[in-house]
Amino acid sequence: MENFINIFVQSIFIDNMIFAYFLGMCSYLAVSKSVKTANGLGIAVTFVLLITVPVNYLLNKFILSEGALAWASQSLGGIDLNFLSFIVFIAVIAWIVQVVEMVVEKFAPTLYNQLGIFLPLIAVNCAIMGASLFMQQRVGDVYHSFGDILAFALGSGVGWWLAIVGIAAIREKMKYSNVPKPLRGLGITFMVTGLMAIAFMSFMGIKLIN
Amino acid sequence: MNSNSRLKVFTTPFNSGNPVTVLVLGICSALAVTVKLQPAFVMAISVTVVTAFSNVIISFLRNTIPNSIRIIVQLLVIATLVILVNEILKAYVYDVSKQLSVYVGLIITNCILMGRLEAFALGNKPIPAFIDGIANGMGYGIILIIVAFFRELFGSGTVFGIQVIPESWYVTQGGFYLNNGLIILPPMALIILGCIIWIHRSINKDLQEK
Amino acid sequence: MENNSDIKNKTNNTKRKKINVNGSAYTVIYSVIIVVIVAVLLTIASTALKPAQKLNQEIEKKENILKTAGKTDKEKAKTDKEKYISEEYAKYISESFVVDINGNKVVDTNVNKKDAFSLEIKRELIKPEAEICLPVFICKDGEQVRYIFQLHGKGLWGPIWGYVAFEKDLNTIAGVVFDHESETPGLGAEITTEIFQKQFEGKKIDEENSFPIIVQKPGGKLNSHTVDGISGGTITSRGVQQMLADNLKLYKGFINKMKSENNDNSIETNDKNQEQ
């Protein structure tokens, strides 16, 4: 249990998708003009991450990695399908985003109206793909169980959510500030993100248990 | 399309249509590989190649792709090209591929690719699409290389791995100079990019946001 | 531009008359064809490039092993690295085998085929202790004998790994090589630099302490068991310390066994000398 909390906290504050890896920057910059929409996208990203990362973990474990096919038959044990992982991951992500969109539309129309336009955007959100790739890279070293993976996925999503809501709140206030003209909009957003990232760096080294 | 408009297709991404500083595309994977010039350079080339060829392929197929699976087909083409690039890097420039690690895979979700496919390749012939791909890849690459140049120069005192700042200047050798550790950290990439946007928009006033 | 899109529309219209591009049968056939093409293409590329990739990895591993034992020359490695490294490896690394936790050699069986070079230590470390297999490389250069062990541990962001070479006494470190996957460049990533790794040469294992080598905050006093860590890379430095402790604990069986063998040998030779 402590281990899960540790991974969860670490993925939110230290390995933050935006501030440490710059992943999902495109939608982060495009959809952070108001807190309300930012919040919607944050929820959507967290939700999709929570599904895609575990699914990709299972695919990686039982199909893609070297010798993974041994469970099916001994003769398949030597096959290494690792080169297909990019394509499988992105296909899973695109497919799940589509399914999530349909399910949400059917069962939670109000949520769908809030998220509607963002859901298709998520398929090409680097944070989603990035999380799957990091998962593949770290599995066996840092993450050992399915629970670890869930904690990582949830933490990454919440971290991203926190970042986008934070910047949206700052940008709402910044509308009233006297920013130099060439910096307005994109330029100042980058700089503020940079400063936020420096602030987040102070979390580095936090560890709940050894 | 005459040669004049082709020239325009080629030059726009370097100024008023720069994918990074104006269209806000492809920032995700861009900033993490800019600590040193060499990986930034390889990343720039990889993205240029993938953008150009995916543009050409989609442009060839543009009248045959069923609308309902358009996005998936585009992702499939991109992912295939990225896997090829990744395998080639691993086989011929192993050291660099180690440095780029998961960021090669993230080219797939680089918004520049999808953005150009949707905005240009689907409506244009292969040759202009190729030019557009090359130009956008290079427009992206130039920003990457500028950021990497400053970060490597001030962060490590080197350019392309060659020592530029004289060894005798360093405090350890009895001099007065220290490498700036902060500039190597992720947040500074964002701030440098903010500065580039500032300069770019001071020169090209049409781009300033209200 | 306008002309162009007009033409596009026309071609679209003429095509639509022949086949319905948005029909479901067409869509299914289309996706099947695309997937088949992609799969074939990728399999060909992957199979064709596999040998070159494998070779790169092998050369890197061999280079690291040689570097740990202090047997590579940077200048010579620059031209035709591949050939140089393979030759040097064949020349110096006289023996390599796999040992278990008690220091006994693991003999190859058909079911469980293992050799020291292709053993993945990452996969061994998560096994229960009794099943762990550890690779040992022995480097011989004339009278000089060095034992090289493999290491694997955790840094700040991801895995770190490396090799450590011991002198014949199995107590003095002859050299180390560290590498990492994703430590912060300029901070934690400095563990790969020569300046950091050079410090370990000649240091001795502290058998009393739970950490055989202490990587301490830079600036403090050093003794034969301590080295300077990296300023700003505290967690990675601690990771190196922990990695050495964890891995050397597993090699302890082998180290003790070799030590007692060496002692026996030296006693024997002493006896012989006395007889003469």
Image (cartoon, coloured by chain):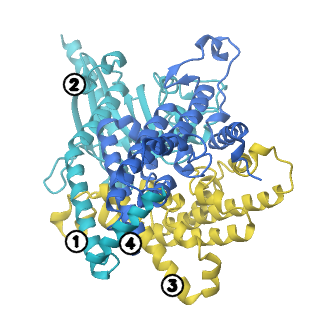
The circle drawn on residue A72 is: 1
Image quarter of residue C11: bottom left
Mark closest to the chain's N terminus, 3 or 1: 1
Image quarter of residue A25: bottom right
Looking at the image, is mark 2 or mark 1 nearer the viewer? 2
Residue type marked 3: Val
Q: Colour of chain B?
A: blue
Horizontal and vertical percent for residue C95?
A: 21, 32
The circle drawn on residue A103 is: 3
Q: Which residue is mark 4?
A: B69
Horizontal and vertical percent for residue B59?
A: 36, 57
Q: Are marks 4 and 3 in contact (CB under 8 Å)?
A: no
Q: Which residue is mark 2?
A: C83
Distance CA(mark 2)–CA(mark 1): 40 Å
Chain for colour cyan: C
Badge 1, how many Cα within 10 Å: few under 14, some, many 20+?
Answer: few
- Read off the chain for label 1: A
Q: Quadrant of the C terminus of chain A?
A: bottom right
Residue type marked 2: Lys
